[in-house]
Image (cartoon, rainbow, N blue to C red):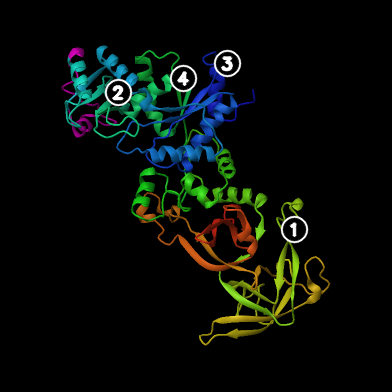
Amino acid sequence: MAEAENFIQQIIDQDIAEGKVTAIRTRFPPEPNGYLHIGHAKSLFVNFGTALRYGGKCNLFFDDTNPSKEKTEYVDAIREDIRWMGYEWDREVYASDFFDQIYEYAERLIAEGKAFVCDLSAEEIRCTRGTLTEPGTESPYRNRSPQENLKLFREMKAGAYEDGSRCLRAKIDMTSPNLNLRDPVIYRILRATHHRTGDRWCIYPMYDYAHPICDFLQGVTHSLCTLEFEDHRPLYDWVGYSLGFSPKPRQIEFARLNVTNLVMSKRYLKKLVEDGSVHGWDDPRMPTLAGLRNRGIPPEAIRDFCARAGVAKANSECEICYFEAVVREDLNARAPRAMAVLDPLKLTIVNYEGEEEIDFEINQTAPDAGTRKVRFGKTLYIERGDFSLDPPPKYYRLKPGGVVRLKNAYIVRCEEVVQREDGTVEEVRCSYLPDSRSGADTSGVKAKGVIQWVNAKTCIDAEIVQYDHLLRDADYAGQDFSERLNSDSEHIFRGKAEPYLAEANENEAFQLMRTGYYKKCTREGVLVLSEIVSLKDNFNK
């Protein structure tokens, strides 16, 4: 076996060496109360990757113990996201598959004096929990007999009591330094229609109680969780030991993936959708896997990012520019090149007649990608920002009397500028150097600037969409996400693009020269070029 790369693998290697386990089984355990986001990609990477390393199995486990927030829509979306990420699970399992067994285990705990029915309200339980420095106060109902507790619990199941009027609590230790062991609630009354079991149940187990039972019943050997569950591990172990699980699954915690400028809470993401701040769960600005897929982020880049971020025991935060750099690196190697202009400015070559085809490199980083033909003509469109009437020093784009190279074509010199009454530039008229064609330049003229262009005769209209981060920068840390929300995060341009883009496959990624990486799609017959990531690399700077 290869040498362990992280602390989880070191623990599993030791368990194997000591004969505690042979076949490894993990599980990816989302709650179906929203769409997966990039933070879940880390858990996918850890759980599926760990099973793969040891030739084991990974289950898809839906923690559906809170029916008031869960939907079949989310179940379907989670399945789609996992497959898009390149993973396939062994078994699809639900906590609701085990509701009968979970209930029977609760009756067993009651019969053994390890659980009791409590009549305190949720607020009263919080007030008696104690603090980190002060012990809690025992419930006045803690010493009910097992017989009375069983009777009350069965009446709870039968629907005899109102929501919140009673609960089942584990009887552990109200003086424990770990607040999670101070007689935690393990069942509550909740009348809500479940997306799978309907109205069969009116009591539901709490996650901390159901979690170790479901792991054991599905044969999980190592329950890999994010770091916020570390303080819950003693309760996980208490349930397993109290119910005599053998072999008992082992819980191991790792640091979750945090990325600056991204909303990493399903509760907040849901609010963004519901209040109309975004177009939906799959809005390209959203950090959901559906949003990243809709934006055109390759799943390979997400997996690579998770691998580079590593598996650690201490929480940390990745800069969003690092994630963008990984995506940019992936797309740079695979994306064909094309040309488009966001804000078109007409350029006429006064000494050129007719049309011709020029060779255009498909991807200069992949020499074997070859070239394709692009139609060149007398009238073109260039980016308005690539011309200046009053340029600053060291301005290498087009200016009155200046020269610039048109990408893969000729050098042109600005001879005349046509302006509107308001002073804005309507057209630039240039001459071209016939002997300056790319690849066969004998003109002797050196043009420091190279700009993209499209042929006015053959180009097509395009809607070009660019995005800023949904949250402003990390200087706002600690504030509510609504105070960090960037209300100007989507920008739409009416530009021009070469026809090659309209002919391309839907959702194909391209590098628009000097602009960024974009995904091609068609909406209502209109070519839409949606930004994946810009060319600007802040990380490597």
Q: Which residue is mark 4?
A: 219
Would residue 189 be found to the left or right of residue 297 on screen?
left
Q: Does the magenta segment cover residue 284?
A: no
Q: Secondary structure at mark 1?
A: strand
Which of label 3 and label 1 is nearer to you?
1
Identify which residue is drawn at 37% across, 51% down. 273
Q: Which residue is mark 1?
A: 371
Q: Earlier in the sequence, mark 4 or mark 1?
A: 4
Which residue does the image show at 56% across and 31% down from the upper left? 49
Query: In this rendering, which labeled residue sits more in front, label 4 or label 2?
Result: 4
Q: Which residue is mark 3?
A: 17
The CA span between labels 2 and 3 is: 34 Å
Viewer-closest of 218 and 38: 218
Residue type, numbered disc 3? Ala
Measuring from the top left, give residue 42's x and y in whole percent. Answer: 50, 38
* Closer to viewer: mark 2 or mark 3: 3
Q: Tell me whether the residue at label 4 lies in contact with that at label 2, contact meaning CB atoms closer than 8 angstroms.
A: no
Cβ–Cβ under 8 Å for marks 1 and 2: no
SS for tag 3? helix
410 displayed left or right of 163: right
Identify the magenta region.
Answer: 120-147
As drawn, is 407 to the left or to the right of 277?
right
Give amino acid for label 4. Answer: Gly
